[in-house]
Amino acid sequence: MIVRVEKVVKKFRRLVCRSRWLAKILGFPLDEGSATRPGLIMIQIDGLSQYEFRKALYKGELPFLKRLIDRENYQEHSHYSGLPACTPAVQGEIFYGVKTIVPAFAFRDPDHKRVVRMYEPAIAAGYEQRLDEQCDEPLLKGGSGYCNIFTGGAAEPHFCAATMGVKSALEAANPFALALLIITNFASVLRIIALVFIELGVSIVDFISGVSRGRNFLKELKFIPTRIGICIVLRELLVIGAKIDMERGLPIVHLNFIGFDEQSHRRGPTSAFAHWTLKGIDYAIKRVWQAAHISPRRQYDVWIYSDHGQCIAKSFLKTRGYPVEDAINQSFAKLEQKVPLIKMLSGKDVQRCCLMGSHKEITKHGHEFTDADLEEAKLEVADLGPVAFIYPDRKYSPVELTIVAQALATDHRIPVVVTEGEDGTMQAITAEGIYKLPDQIEELFGAEHPFVADIGEDLLGLCGHPNAGALVLLGWRKGMAESMTFVPENGSHAGLTHEETNPFSLLPKDTQLPDNGKQYLRPGELRLAALHFLKRKLFKTTPRSAPFTNTEQKTLKVMTYNVHSCIGLDGKLDLARISRVIAQAEPDVVCLQELDLLRVRSGKDDQAQLIAELLEMNYHFHPAMHMEEEQYGDAILTHLPMRTVKTGVLPGVIPGSKREPRGALWVSVSFDGKEVQIINTHLGLSASEQQLQIQALLGDEWLGSALNEKAPVIFCGDFNFHPGSRPYRRVVGRMKDAQLQLANQKPKNTFYSRFPLFRIDHIFINEQVEVVAIDVPKSRTAKNASDHLPLMAEFRII
C-alpha cells in the first residue's frame, strides 16, 4: 500500500516538475536511454581552501555539506592544485588533462603582443583550442558547463569565458518561451529578488565599512552590483540551469560557484563577508543534489570540489611603500646605468612608471626623454596576485638577469625571484642566497609543505612556460607569516602557500580513484576518476582481497537487507545502486532477501551473482519460489570462507493459495578461528504463517541443533513481524534481539524506507555473540534503492 502511494506521489511530482516543463518549452533535446546510466554533476567552489572549508564546517556555515559527510557517505579528500594555483590552469588539467596550460591568470601573450587576462573571450578561446589539440577526450563532452574559463568540450557552455554567454536553446528561444521561463520559475524569481535585497543591505554595510577605512569610494561603490550579480543572480541561474540539464539527462554537468573567490580577493578568505557567501552556495548545492536524486533519466552522482585556495595577502605597495614597478626600474637601472621604463597594462589604462616619477622629469645625460626613448626602453610586467612576470625590452644574459634578480631580492625584499642560471637550469634568488631548482625546493619552501614532492617539478613548468617572463617574482617562501601580492587585494592565489595549493574534494566514499601512492589528489586524477565513473575511460582498480573491516579489531559486521528485487522507490531497476548501499556500509556478511533469478520483470538477470561480483564476494543463493525457469529467493554473500549447511522451503503455504513460498538459507562462516552459524530467512505476511515458520526454524533441523551445541549463531532476515507479536516473543525466548543489547540506544526501524516507521527486519543472536554496534544506513541512496533500509550489526564472537 505504501509503495503504491509513493508511486502516485512520484507521478504527480513529475507532472508538475518545473524543470521538465521548461525543457519542453525551450525545446531542449533529451538524452534518451536507460534510467540507470551513470551521470555526474561536478560542483566547483572557486577559491575555497581545505582549511577554510573545514573552518566553515565547524562554524556551521556549510550545514548541507556537513550532512553529506555525516549521513550520506561522503568523504573529504585533500587536493593539490598544481601550479599556478589558478582556475584556468586547474580547469585545463581537469577538463583536458594538460598541466600548466597558462603560467598565471595574467601574462604577456606573444601573439597579441600585450598582457592578457584569462577572462578575455578571445584569449580563453585561443588557449582552449590548444588544449583541444592535446586531448582526445574533453571531460565535459556531451554535457554542459556553467561559469567556467574553458568549455571543457561541453556541448552547451553557459557563462564561460571562452564563449561568453548562454549557448544552446536559450539563444534561439522566442519571447513567448522566455516569458514562460519566467512564469514557471516565478518562485525562483521571487527568491532572487528577495536575496538581492538582502545582499544589497549587506553590501551597503560593507561599503560604509570599506570607505570608513580609507578605501577608494568609487571602487567600493562599483563592487556592490558586482557582488550582487555574482553572489545571487548568477548563482541562482546556475541552479536553474543544472536542474533543467538533469531533467534532460545530460551525462555530465559542471557548475562553478565563484562568489567566495571574488569576495576573498576583496576582503580576504577569512573575512565574514567571504564566508557569508558560503551559506548561499551550500543551499544551492543542496537543491542541485536533491534534483540529482530524483532525476528520471540517469543515476547521478554529485561531486563537490574546489580548484585552489586563497591566502591572506598584503600588497607590495602597502609593505614597501612604493609600487613594484619602481623596484623593477631601480633594479634594471643598477644593471644598465640608465632608467628604463616599465609599461604596465591594466585594463584599458596604460600606466608608465619610472624611477624618479613622471617621465618628463627624467633626463638622460642631462636631456629630457623623448617619446621615442620611452618606447625603446619599455619593459612589460604582468602582476596579478603573488606571481609576477617581467618581460624585458631585449634579451639579457643569465648573468645580467641574476644581477637584476639579486637587486630585487636584496634591495626590495621580494621573497623569491626565479630566473635561468648560466648552466641553463632554473635558480631561485632570495635575500639569503641562490637556490637550485628543483634540488633545493625544501630549503626554499619548507620540508613541511604538504606538496613538497610535487611543487619542484610544477614550479619548473610554471617558470619555464613559453609565456612566462625572463624573471618570475614569487610573493612567498618559507618563514613568511603572510604572502605578498603585487596588486592591491586582501586575498590572493596562484602562488605556492599551503592554503593556495590545498583545495579539497567531497566525494561519495565508494568513488574509485586512481592510486597515486599519495595522500592527496591532483586535478588530473580527479579527471580520470570522473571519466572512469562515466565508463568513458576506465583505469585498472585494485581488487579488494582483504575484508572491509579491520581484522585487528576482531569484529564481524553482518547486514540483513530486503532489496525488493533491486527495484527502487523511483521505479528504477538498479543492481549497482543496491551494491553501492551495501559497499558503503562495509559488511563482512550480507544476508539478502527478495532476489530475482531469470525473471522477466528484472531483465532475466542473476541478481545474487551480479551483486556478488560487484562486491567481490562469494555467495550462496536459495530460491524459495519457482515459476518455470524464473526463481525468487534469498542469498548470503561474504568474502570470508563459507560453506552451505542447509537450505529449504518453510511450512505455511496452503497448496493452491496465492501466498508466496518462504525459505531459509543456513551457512557456516569461518571468522577468527571460529565457525559462525548464520541463518537468513524471509517469513510470510500472516501471523499464522509466521508461527509455523518460526516453529520450524527453532526446531532441531535448523536453529535448535546449533543453539544446543553453543555455537555462535546469528539469525536474521525480513521477518515481517513487529516486536511484541507472538512469533517475535517465541524467538526471543530462545535468542536475544541484537538491537536491544546496547544501552542508551533505541532500536531502529527499517520499513518503510522513505519514512521508517516499522521494525520488521531483525537480527537475533545467542550468548556466544556480543553486540558492538547497530546501525541503519539512511542515506538518500539507501532510501531510494529499496522499500526496506538495511540493518547493520557489528559483533564480537566470544
Image (tube, grey):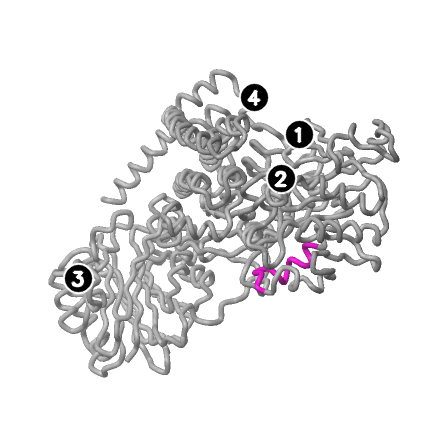
- Per the picture, the main secondary structure of the magenta-coloured stretch is helix
Other-residue count near label 3 (Cα within 10 Å), few / some / many at <14 / 14–19 / ≥20: many
Does residue 397 appear to the left or right of 477 in the view shown?
Answer: right
Q: Can the viewer see residue 435?
A: yes
Query: Would you place residue 363 above or below residue 714 in this image?
Result: above
Give the label, 1 or 2, closer to the camera.
2
Mark earlier in primary sequence (4, 3): 4
Other-residue count near label 1 (Cα within 10 Å), few / some / many at <14 / 14–19 / ≥20: few
The magenta span reads 448-459
Residue at image mark 4 = 172
Going by the numbered disc 3, the residue's amino acid type is Gln
Q: Which mark is residue 690?
A: 3
**Which quadrant of the rendered structure holds the C terminus?**
bottom left
Q: CA distance from mark 4 to mark 3?
A: 64 Å
Say what secondary structure mark 4 lies in: helix
Query: Would you place residue 199 above or below residue 434 in this image?
Result: above
Q: Are marks 1 and 3 in contact (CB under 8 Å)?
A: no
Q: Which mark is residue 487?
A: 2
Count of numbered labels shown in the rendering: 4
Mark earlier in primary sequence (1, 2): 1
Query: Would you place residue 320 above or below residue 644 in this image?
Result: above
